[in-house]
Image: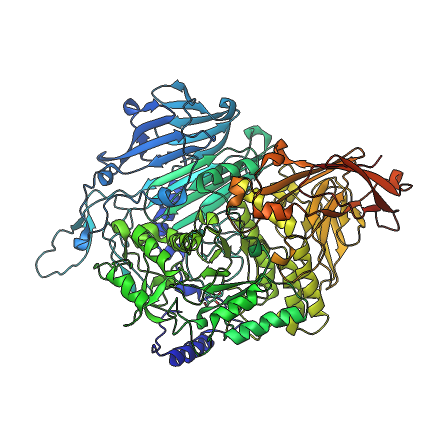
């Protein structure tokens, strides 16, 4: 997208952009890979890979030049402090690197390494630069919101000249075994090493050094080459002082400063996480070989136009959190660093017994983390379950915000709905065809000349009446607001941004000017608290005129995308609030903008406090606290449909589960089968939005020929029916970070065969197992069965599986979504189709009880007003359902005393909501003679009719309790004996 040059007049700009986009875009062509660096084009990545190669070549003779000064080690109140000495030349000169190892109450350990001379700000910057001299130490301030309390119970188990051992964690079952020379830390659980830092000796903190001019050459011989003191001759210095890529030169005022470390997961064959990449959930090896990547996984948030699949290439967001899995054990690490980062992964077999010739050998996954600068700051999680690991990680970085309820309904978007009349017409058409939806979106063309907070007044003459029409059916509007602010006279937002000094600065200290949708633009520096405050003022209803309480926001292009910048983003030597270079903070940038908008939406008028909904494209660890993300500019192809599920699963297990992909595919025109299949898959994305590029044909579901319209309508209705189950899954994500859609390794960590399955998933703890069909003309699909439970078809109640490991082939003609129900679960549903989620808020429930092998089942419902924060003061209903023996009970979770909760407006209204029916799938034949059963609720006994259907063909027996009538918020029970 670099190099767009259009005038700034509305239509000229518009046509020019469309023309340019058409020129650039062709469905068959993927991303311009050469616009983005490979490791060997990124100086610090190349240097660190060379460092690793050198160590490998030297084999056992390689010794890491880092050692702890044993005499200065101190341990107090759960924290160890020491100095690591790095030997920097053959003469034995050293630099001091302060080390802290802290042990947190959650059982997490944290290892931080800094550089003394930079802590003391005792360095010289080049080019007269005014940027900060320290290593960037504020990532914690953005990413971490809790969980840092230190475990004062952690104790020194032994200490000697060679090292120190600390026991910590639950029942003191964990141990950090720190070896002084060379420096390494082994993390053990129950005496067994799980994770080892600097295992292969690849730790490398490029220390600060002055740039020295090379000795002048004899007169007459010219040389502009330069070199540096104390540098081993073998090092490649060519990218130490400046670096050019794609015509942009990075001035590097602090010289080389990368941080790198190898981390080995002992005995672990699978690693997951470090989104965002378009590839398999179980991460591939990255140093070549069959089926492996050649390049490390890269984390450098970027606007990667039409990304390629199955690639370690960077995408829009970065979460440097990785977990490793082996049978019955999950562990993880979080590399807290906001700079450009690369991660190499290799797997090595290690024989347990050297004489056993591979028998009993185990695989170690070796990782090598390489960041351009900043602190070395690592959190280590010892599990042992996936749930434990994500819980500890989200204790630090926060959990998913409990969303606005509408936000988990269906979102209808395209670039662009061109006028308020267009929006109204789309809204009417959805109603005419009885298709539910909750939100319609406005992309950038609604603005006056890409000036955010304004309207293109010819086309959007009356935004309020548009909002009111939507509101009549409880629907919402989302408008896009990007971080680039048009640099043009007379535009209030730009004038305020620049006059208040709130824009990102260039390396000379002036306002950075770059190119994006509006042409010449400035960027809000959302790292600056004053900028957040100002940004908040722009969203007030009386400031952003035309918006209403049902308007919410989409933040796009916040990597940030700069069309004429290096790698389509900002120059690394730009300067942010506090004097930090863009290089220091790049991967945080998107989150800070998302955060500013979140803050702005918290309250748009006095007295209002509501849950914001903000979609972001760029993200970092912690973004989950602020809203939803989507996977950016995919394509209308079967391959992209297939790629979406592993990407969304990766988000889910990495703490940011409110994720989706553009349904239908952003670029191109999906064939009808593809569009139908995509809606079927999308109905099971946590964030469910149809979106299309400006050049794509209109594809609102009602426009499609039959059977597609009906297929898509059914998928949407299925989503709406299951909204209570989705909302309950979001509640759990909000409580403990658990993913909303869950891969097999996460739900079945003992089942090794499921560890690389990433094309099917469970929805929360509902027991619904979904396998979207992502191939053309497929009418059957194979589902992996991860355990010995009973599995029933969701729609037909056919009992399909009872045994683990089986790849079950199920029929999946175009009109069918393969969804199984696992025995042992109960999930809530609302069966009356309506136009939007808000219109369903007081509908009665259906409970689906799927009997397990042992005849038991359990499940939950969490519900609140779906809009305010009143749930925090008890305005919610949380029920646990249980079938045990012949008794079905509904009770308050955790024995909550619901009766004494002072009921607000919503709870009072909700008090009348009842259970309509209960469906028992796999009902025992002993119920066949029953016609009525006894319900006990609110002190009264009544009888309820039971309709038993005996097993027939492959279909399991089922029973329906009709017109139950018990209030969903009350405690009640049914006696089925
Ligand atoms: C890029 C986004 O990824 C896409 O979804 C959006 O339609 C365009 N920007 C225009 O705003």
Q: What is the residue that sits farthest to the right in this orientation?
A: 929
Q: Does residue 395 sit above or below 510 in this rendering?
A: above
**Going by the image, does 343 lie left or right of 750?**
left
Q: Does residue 629 sit above or below 871 in this rendering?
A: below
396, 345: nearer the viewer: 396
Residue 344 horizontal/vertical position (percent): 45, 47
921, 298: nearer the viewer: 921
**Going by the image, does 52 lie left or right of 810?**
left
Residue 475 horizontal/vertical position (percent): 57, 62
Residue sitting at x 38%, y 27%: 179
Q: Is residue 832 visible?
A: yes
**Going by the image, does 924 lie left or right of 403?**
right
224, 830: nearer the viewer: 830
Q: What is the residue that sits farthest to the left in this orientation?
A: 219
Q: Quadrant of residue 469?
A: bottom right
Q: Quadrant of residue 564?
A: bottom left
**Going by the image, does 339 lie left or right of 726?**
left
Residue 194 horizontal/vertical position (percent): 50, 32
Viewport quadrant of the C terminus: top right
Residue 778 horizontal/vertical position (percent): 71, 63
Q: Does residue 482 sit above or below 147 in this rendering?
A: below
Residue sitting at x 65%, y 45%: 911
Viewport quadrant of the N terminus: bottom left
């Amino acid at each position: 997208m670099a190099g767009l040059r259009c005038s700034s007049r509305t239509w000229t700009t518009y046509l020019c952009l469309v023309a340019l986009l058409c020129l650039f875009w062709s469905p068959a062509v993927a991303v311009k890979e050469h616009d983005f660096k490979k490791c060997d084009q990124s100086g610090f990545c190349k240097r660190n890979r060379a460092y690793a190669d050198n160590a490998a070549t030297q084999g056992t003779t390689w010794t890491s030049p880092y050692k702890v000064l044993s005499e200065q080690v101190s341990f107090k109140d759960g924290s160890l402090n020491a100095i690591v000495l790095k030997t920097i030349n053959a003469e034995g000169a050293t630099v001091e690197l302060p080390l802290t190892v802290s042990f947190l109450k959650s059982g997490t350990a944290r290892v931080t390494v800094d550089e003394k001379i930079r802590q003391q700000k005792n360095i010289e910057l080049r080019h007269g630069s005014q940027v900060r001299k320290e290593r960037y130490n504020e990532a914690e301030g953005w990413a971490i919101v809790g969980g840092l309390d230190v475990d004062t119970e952690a104790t020194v188990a032994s200490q000697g000249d060679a090292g120190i051992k600390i026991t910590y964690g639950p029942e003191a079952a964990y141990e950090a075994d720190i070896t002084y020379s060379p420096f390494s830390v082994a993390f053990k659980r129950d005496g067994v090493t799980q994770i080892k830092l600097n295992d292969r000796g690849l730790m490398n903190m490029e220390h600060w050094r002055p740039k020295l001019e090379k000795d002048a050459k004899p007169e007459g011989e010219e040389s502009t080459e330069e070199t540096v003191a104390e540098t081993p001759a073998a090092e490649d210095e060519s990218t130490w002082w400046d670096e050019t890529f794609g015509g942009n030169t990075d001035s590097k005022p602090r010289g080389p400063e990368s941080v790198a470390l190898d981390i080995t997961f002992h005995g672990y064959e699978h690693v997951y996480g470090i989104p965002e990449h378009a590839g398999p959930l179980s991460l591939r090896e990255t140093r070549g070989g069959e089926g492996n990547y050649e390049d490390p996984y890269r984390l450098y948030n970027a606007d990667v136009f039409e990304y390629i699949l199955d690639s370690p290439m960077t995408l829009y967001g970065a979460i440097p959190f990785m977990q490793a899995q082996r049978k019955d054990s999950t562990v993880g690490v979080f590399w807290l660093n906001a700079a450009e980062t690369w991660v190499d992964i290799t797997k090595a077999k290690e024989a347990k017994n050297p004489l056993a010739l591979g028998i009993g050998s185990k695989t170690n996954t070796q990782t090598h983390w390489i960041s351009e600068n900043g602190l070395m700051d690592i959190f280590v999680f010892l599990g042992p379950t996936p749930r434990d690991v994500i819980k500890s990680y989200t204790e630090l970085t926060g959990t998913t915000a409990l969303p606005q309820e509408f936000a988990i309904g269906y979102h209808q978007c395209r670039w662009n709905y061109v006028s308020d009349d267009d929006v109204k017409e789309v809204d009417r058409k959805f109603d005419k065809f009885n298709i539910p939806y909750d939100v319609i979106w406005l992309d950038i063309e609604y603005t006056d000349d890409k000036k955010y907070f304004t309207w293109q007044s010819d086309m959007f003459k009356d935004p309020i009446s548009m909002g009111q029409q939507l509101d009549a059916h409880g629907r919402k509007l989302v408008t896009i607001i990007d971080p680039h602010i048009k640099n043009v006279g007379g535009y209030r937002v730009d004038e305020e941004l620049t006059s208040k000094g709130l824009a990102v600065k260039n390396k000379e200290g002036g306002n950075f000017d770059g190119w994006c949708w509006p042409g010449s633009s400035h960027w809000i520096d959302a790292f600056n608290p004053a900028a957040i405050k100002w940004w908040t003022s722009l969203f007030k209803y009386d400031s952003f005129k035309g918006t209403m309480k049902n308007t919410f926001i989409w933040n796009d292009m916040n990597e940030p995308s700069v069309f004429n910048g290096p790698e389509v983003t900002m120059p690394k030597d730009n300067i942010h609030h506090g004097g930090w270079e863009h290089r220091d903070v790049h991967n945080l940038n998107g989150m800070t903008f998302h955060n500013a908008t979140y803050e702005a939406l918290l309250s748009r008028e006095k007295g209002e406090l509501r849950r914001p909904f903000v979609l972001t494209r760029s993200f970092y660890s912690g973004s989950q606290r602020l809203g939803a993300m989507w996977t950016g500019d995919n394509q209308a192809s079967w391959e992209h449909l297939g790629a979406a599920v592993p990407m969304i699963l990766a988000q889910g297990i990495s703490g940011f589960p409110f994720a989706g992909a553009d349904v239908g595919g952003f670029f191109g025109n999906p064939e009808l089968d593809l569009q139908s299949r995509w809606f079927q898959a999308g109905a099971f994305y946590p964030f469910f939005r149809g979106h299309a590029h400006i050049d794509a044909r209109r594809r609102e579901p009602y426009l499609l020929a039959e059977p597609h319209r009906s297929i898509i309508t059914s998928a949407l209705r299925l989503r709406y029916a299951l909204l209570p189950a989705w909302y309950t899954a979001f509640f759990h994500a909000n409580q403990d970070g658990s993913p909303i859609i869950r891969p097999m390794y996460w739900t079945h960590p003992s089942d090794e065969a499921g560890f690389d399955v990433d094309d099917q998933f469970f929805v929360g703890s509902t027991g619904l197992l979904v396998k979207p069909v992502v191939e053309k003309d497929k009418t059957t699909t194979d589902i992996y069965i991860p355990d010995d439970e009973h599995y029933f078809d969701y729609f037909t109640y056919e009992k399909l599986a009872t045994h683990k490991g089986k790849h079950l082939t199920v029929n999946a003609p175009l009109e069918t979504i393969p969804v199984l129900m696992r025995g042992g679960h109960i999930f809530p549903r609302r069966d009356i189709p309506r136009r939007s989620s808000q219109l369903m808020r007081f509908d009665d429930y259906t409970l689906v009880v799927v009997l397990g092998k042992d005849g038991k089942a359990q499940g939950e419902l969490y519900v609140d007003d779906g809009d305010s924060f009143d749930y925090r003061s008890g305005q919610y209903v949380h029920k646990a359902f249980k079938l045990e023996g012949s008794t079905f009970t509904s009770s308050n979770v955790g024995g909550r005393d619901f009766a004494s909760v002072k009921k607000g407006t919503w709870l009072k209204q909700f008090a009348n909501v009842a259970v309509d029916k209960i469906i028992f799938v796999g009902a025992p034949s002993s119920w066949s003679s029953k016609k009525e059963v006894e319900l006990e609720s609110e002190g009264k006994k009544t009888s309820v009719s039971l309709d038993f259907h005996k097993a027939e063909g492959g279909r399991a027996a089922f029973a329906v309790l009709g017109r139950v009538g018990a209030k969903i918020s009350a405690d009640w029970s049914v006696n089925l004996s």
